[in-house]
Amino acid sequence: MMRFRTAKAVASAALIGALLAPISAAADGVTVGQTFIAAGLDPAEGSNGWALVSHGIGEQLFKVSREGEVVPNLAASATLNGDGTWTVELAPNRFFSDGTAVTAETVAMALNRTGESNPSARATAGLLTFTALDEDTLTVSTEQPTTILPSILAEWAFPVYRMDGEAPVFTGPFAVTTFEPGATIEMTPNTFYADAETRSDVTVRRIADGQSLALAFASGELDMAFNLPVETLAMLEATEGETVTFPVAYQYMMWMNTRTPALADPQVRRAIDMAVNRADLVTAAQAGVPATGAFAANYPFAAPGPLPFDPAMAASLLDEAGWALGSDGVRAKDGERLELVLYAYPQRPDLVTFQPVVRAALAEIGVAITTQVTESPSDVAGSGAFDLFLWAQHTAPAGDPGLFLSLFFETDAARNYTGWSNPDYDALIAELRAEGNPQARIGLALRAQEMIAAEAPVSFLVTPEWHVGLSPALAGYEPWGSDYYVIRPDLVAAE
Amino acid sequence: MAGALGLVGRLALSWLAVVAAAFLLLRTMPGDPIEMFLDQMSVQSGPEIVAAYRAAWGLDEPLTWQFLHWLEGFVTFDWGVSFETGRPVAADFAARLPYSAAIGVGGMTLAVIVGFLLGYLAALRTGGAFDAISRGLAVAGQSLPAFAVGLVALWVLGVELRWIDAFGGGPVERIVMPMLLVTFFSVGAMARLTRAGFAEVKRSPYFRTALAKGRSRPAALWHHGRAAGALTLIAGLAPELAWIIGGTAVAEIVFGVPGISERVVQAVSHRDYAILQPYIALLALWVALVLHGARGVRRALDPRIP
């Protein structure tokens, strides 16, 4: 009886001990938590291509480097031919994760399949047709002429793969072992990728809520927590590891509708542009850096900045434009008060946070602002039914400035929300479109930004920053490239 | 037979009216799914790509034709593919249903069992400890935000005490915490409903007769009150059960469980009609079945119910 009681007591103590013991934080391999995960493994469907590259599973022929330049990846080079087609040479000794060599034929088969089924692969130059010339050489013909094929091939829609029956096989540093849609991807190092022996297994977990993501990192379940909410950073100060902040290319800006009578005058737009203190916006968002132009500072075509903040000059510009300050603090001209409606959208909470800051800044120079929030930003912006519109946009998703500068600012362009029109600008963009030399393109993009700044159909405000939690095992890993390259070949856990 | 056919006909018509109204409401919601997708994916494109997506997603047809096309697909189990992910909707739902069902059904079952017992104990001694506990749980269930309670549970159990591995475990480990969250928010209401049924019996002459015959209060109340307690519980439970699949979004989002509710929330923010429409159709069917089923059970338990 005594022995039975002793055994029961030991068992109870063991059970209690097991329940009270902290769960071991360190498991084999690396666990990455993020708010998104690939929905499927077929890059031709939905937005899978983007997630697969972001997870380190897929790779494109070209990629965007940390410095914001388009550089060869699975390709060695791309050359524009006299007839408008391109010749792409593949890099030697590149393999799929099953050991099959990357050949021109497999690349052509995959990218033609993607182009046929995924409209996003046809967004920049229409349908691309790939033809294998030999083992390592492809020709690419494009539906619309382009001088920037490497940049197009760096877009998220173009990861290279081969279909093994129904299952796609990729070339990235990690290969999928198990996949639970919407929840988890378990990966092992691709043994046919350089330096595979230095990498550990990686598990990607989707944790949709940012607060839960932060708690999972604090509990030691994650080695990397990607894109933590800024308000959780203070809590994580006591957590083992570090939080790293890095700039991302989703620029915050404010469209100014040139069809609004008051905003038809460039002087009024310039006054508004220089009345907003970008440092105040950074403080309000608790992250980011003041924008210098259309592009984040790491891109070679980013404007040098800084953009002016001068409320006194802004006020005098409005005086010159005939907008006289009234006794109620609001300017008026020919009986019309300078009252504008400022839109933002909740999908980007920072923009809603900016609204009162912008309103207060513009009130200082006598511009009355009414704020509105819409859940349909594209509809409202596209309809032109706004005066000012706070906006977030990745301005160079494939490392080239041309598309943004064209699509949003050329006369009658599809997303020219502001209605701005400048024949000199249009001519400059036509030149940019025809120019293939990267250095020359940088110069043209800088000139285009100067022209935009001079007439201010938009006010570039803030380059946002994201926050990443890293456990000691991943100390030194540097996130870059927004959410396009979260897991890269250099994701190596410390011994 | 004629009555059964009439019931099925009424159910089918109600279902059709609900899904048609939902179809129209979804299409009139502000926000174009194509623009949202292109914005989210930073696809800088012109109208031809928008048109290509509109055609690929079947949004270029007249609304009536879209509805009939969808209806035909739904009844033949061809539910199409998600706009956002390109994944077949039926496969997505099938993979997620076990999580949502386990959380919803498991959480509610636990709430019913614990709530019934708590309600009985609360009725046994009005104003006693169990009465206070059940009232406290009911108030907490109505007033505390589920999101905050879930996050606090994560923080205390996962971060401070490190008793749970909320995100890292297998499927079973992953559903325990969200299931308990569902239980926490339902158990108080279940207990108070049950208590009301038992309390009514306590006031009845036959209960006093049973006591006079020498039965103890607990035994008499259990013997004579459990059917009444069950009846009031079922009446209150039916609407709760109707939302059991899909009403657990907070639990799924906080604990990172890939269930249907979490997917639906995601689909709303992307205006993914391909996900939302069959979800609403299934929900409408489920609600109708649960409400009619509960009515049948109550009739069986109490023939006086018309």
Image (cartoon, coloured by chain):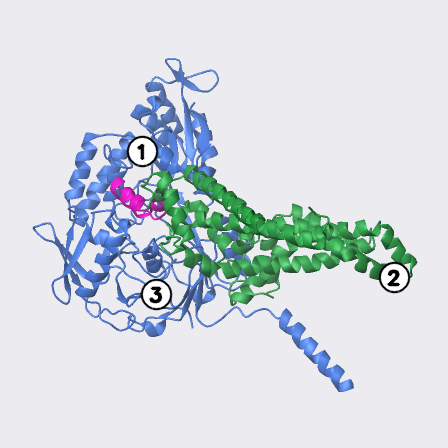
Chain colours: A blue, B green
Give how far across and how far down residue A299 sits, in percent. Answer: 28, 49
Q: Nearer the viewer, mark 1 or mark 2?
A: 2
Please rate how many residues cluster around mark 2, counting C-alpha atoms within 10 Å: few if below 14, some from 14 to 19, many from 20.
Answer: few
Q: Which mark is first along the chain, 3 or 1? A: 1
Q: Amino acid at mark 2?
A: Ser
Res B28 → quadrant:
top left
Q: Chain of mark 1?
A: A
Q: Nearer the viewer, mark 2 or mark 3?
A: 2
Q: Nearer the viewer, residue A50 or A371?
A: A50
Left or right: residue B174 versus residue A479 is right
Q: Are marks 1 and 3 in contact (CB under 8 Å)?
A: no
Magenta stretch contains residue B86: no
Q: Chain of mark 3?
A: A
Q: Are marks 2 and 3 in contact (CB under 8 Å)?
A: no
Q: Which residues are magenta?
A: B37-57
> Do the residues indicated by labels 1 and 2 lie within the same chain of the protein?
no
Residue A311: in sight, yes or no? yes
The CA distance from mark 1 to mark 2 is 80 Å
Give how far across and how far down residue A257 sits, in percent. Answer: 33, 29
Which disc number belongs to residue A417?
1
Q: Is residue A314 above or below residue A207?
A: above
Name the residue tied to disc 3: A490
Q: Nearer the viewer, residue A485 or A113?
A: A113
Q: Nearer the viewer, residue A466 or B212?
A: B212
Give how far across and how far down residue B156 sits, in percent. Answer: 62, 59
